[in-house]
Image (tube, helix red, strand yellow):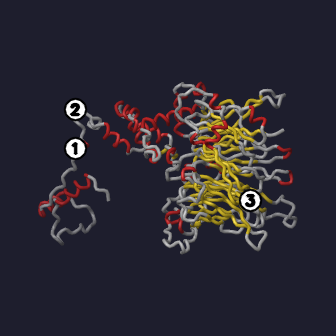
Amino acid sequence: MNITPSTIFNFLRNQGRRGPPAGDDEPNPEGEPLPAARRQSLDAAFGRIAPRPILPAAYETPDPSGRCWLIELPEELLVKVFSALDRVSLARCMRVCGTIHDLLTTNPHLALQTLLSFSSLRLNPNALIPSQTNLHLSPPSPAELLARLRDRLDRFDRLDPTRTTSMRMQETEGSLYEYLEGVLLKSVGGSRGRPTNTIGIYDVRGVGAVQAALAPPPPAAAESSGTMTIDDQVFENDDREDDWEEMEEGDEVAEKIRRSKKFDFGVSEFAVDPGQDLLVLVELTGRLRSARQYVILFHLLSLETLEPHPLARQHVLEWPIVHSRKEVSLGFQICDDGMFVLNHNIRSGQYDQICGWQWTSGRLAVTLKAFPTMTFESFILLSPTSLLVPTIITHLDPESTTQEDLNNPSDLSWTHHLHLYAFPSLASISLPDDSSEPFPPPHAVTHITTFDLPEFVVDLTDEMPPPRMTIRTDPPPRHTFPTHPVDLVQPFSPHPESGVIIIEFFCQMPAGRMPHYVMACQKRTFIQYLPAPTSPLLKQAWPRQAPVVKWETISPKVRMFGPDMKSSNWVCYVYQDRYVASTSSRRNSHDPLDYNAKIRLYDFNPLRVKREALHASAGIDGEERGVTLITGETVLRNILPLAYEVRTGSEFPYTFVEMEGQAEVLLLDDERLIAVYVSRQV
């Protein structure tokens, strides 16, 4: 129970009452309230003290002269008072009076807290720790962090760089890529389906305080075979002018940030979490005495030293089921102490499966397998204890007359869905102290809700298969703060419940037409369906069938673009509330090579979009600053492969900015926008 001044006051007041003798205070036989005269006589007979009125506390009584004692407090105390408020309370306080408004906007501590809360960011306390390698380097002050964050947000809003840094990748083209928060991984050599034992690591976090802009690749890159040019852009405060002589020294920049490592096993897949200094490499090895049985092994290494990770009790984890093919197709999500892997596109009678490990202990914590007529297309962690999985389900017409003709698919239909699963926290299970004792069994994943997606026309006889899907959101919804690299730790961490989810639909039509749709939605749209993390329903069998949410219910809260959206070769195009894509439009309808290419950066942050809407209502034209506000619905006509007209976004406005440029791959995080140009030998 919370003890407040009012609680103490009422307690002391009640201590002064004296009750009637035992047996004398009988209730009214009729059950009706006692008359006022009878009640007064009883009070007089037993000497009961009448209750005294509750007086307001001294701090609740306004000063008769109108003086505000809150403002009279020292600024150091005011900072502590307002630092404990949330975003809504801060917004209300800013409208109380001009003095408090000036305090919240001019004090570096409070202004930084306000800007962080309005951007759904958190301040990483590890960024305020003094450097261990350079003792003369003091940690950044609140004023420096505020200036850095303001400049970064402003430059993202305008897509205005300070300068561009370019470099070339010297390694031959590989088939594996991954990027997250300034760390780019790529395989060196090897062909699709065949693992390579060498990977290249490009750590662009230390390139310098530069801003992202896109420039064409240098002429030397167009003459070389199998090379790439990436233009790194870091959104930080830098007032220096463009120094093209320095930027053209791409090889020197690459040598400072590039590493390559050759391992003694073939690397089939990899994943990275730079904030935890974690690098995961996948090895597919064969079992002895069997030519068609393979084991998937996960090597947990330190990204900095490429040695076994010091926090991992087991440095090699094993997939729980024997694999029957020499190829794997895996999807990864690493969040806090959890590592989740999807093994999909499996043949030989095996079904798609998601497994989650507590990688610090090596315990297999979560398993989820698709049923026979379902495919797991991809997955994300909606929270550290929930999964959002796009699925395709195959249905058979019960009145089919062609069941005996297996080559006739006319009695089949396919539907697309999002399945929401939840499970208890990985840290809620106590582990044995003795490493020789077995771990507790994996959690039982609970099916929470199914969300229907738009319907597509599928006709296998006319070369129209069901569209395939991918889902992506970065960063993972982690509750821990990044700790690496120690001297260059990320100062701002996104709130785990913030961010946008991007779902892509890859369609295939006759005559080679490949429609591509992209759907964007907020995480909070689906988080509201989750039970509490401590709910007992997550630890027992769900007593009912999971409900189904129709497409019409969520369509106003999402945006769907297409069918001419360009698909990226990589899947690192979204970070928190922003999504980047390339667009092109024909300048001359008779010349297919004459087109206008642009880079478009979408912003789905609700508060920033609301700010643009307020500017528009006040008559401030956002297009003069290059910002386009979209508030109306997005209507997709019922052109194949869509089965009907799709209307989305009536409750989900957004903004976007554009800049001239073209790149084959676009990578995004909270500090950089990276364009990758691929040159091919003619």
Residue identified by numbered label 3: 345
Res. 291 mark: none
Q: Residue at point 58% right, 68% down?
A: 442
Tell me the quarter of the picture where residue 367 sits: bottom right
The answer to whether residue 388 is left or right of residue 636 is left
The amino acid on which the numbered mark 2 sits, given as a three-letter code, is: Ser
Res. 65 mark: 2
The amino acid on which the numbered mark 1 sits, given as a three-letter code, is: Ala
Across and down, in percent, residue 607 comes to: 52, 38
The amino acid on which the numbered mark 3 sits, given as a three-letter code, is: Asn
Tell me the quarter of the picture where residue 193 sits: bottom right
The answer to whether residue 385 is left or right of residue 168 is left
Mark 2 or mark 1, which is nearer the start of the sequence?
1
Q: Marks 3 and 2, Cα distance to the nearest angstrom? A: 76 Å
- Res. 71 in view: yes
Across and down, in percent, residue 281 comes to: 65, 57
Res. 58 mark: 1
Q: Residue at point 67% right, 34% down?
A: 599
Mark 2 lies on a secondary structure that is loop
Between 552 and 448, the one lying in front of the other is: 448
Mark 3 or mark 1, which is nearer the start of the sequence?
1
Is 99 located above or below residue 116 in the figure? Answer: above
The answer to whether residue 143 is left or right of residue 303 is left
Between 504 and 492, the one lying in front of the other is: 492
User: Closer to the camera: disc 1 or disc 3?
Assistant: 3
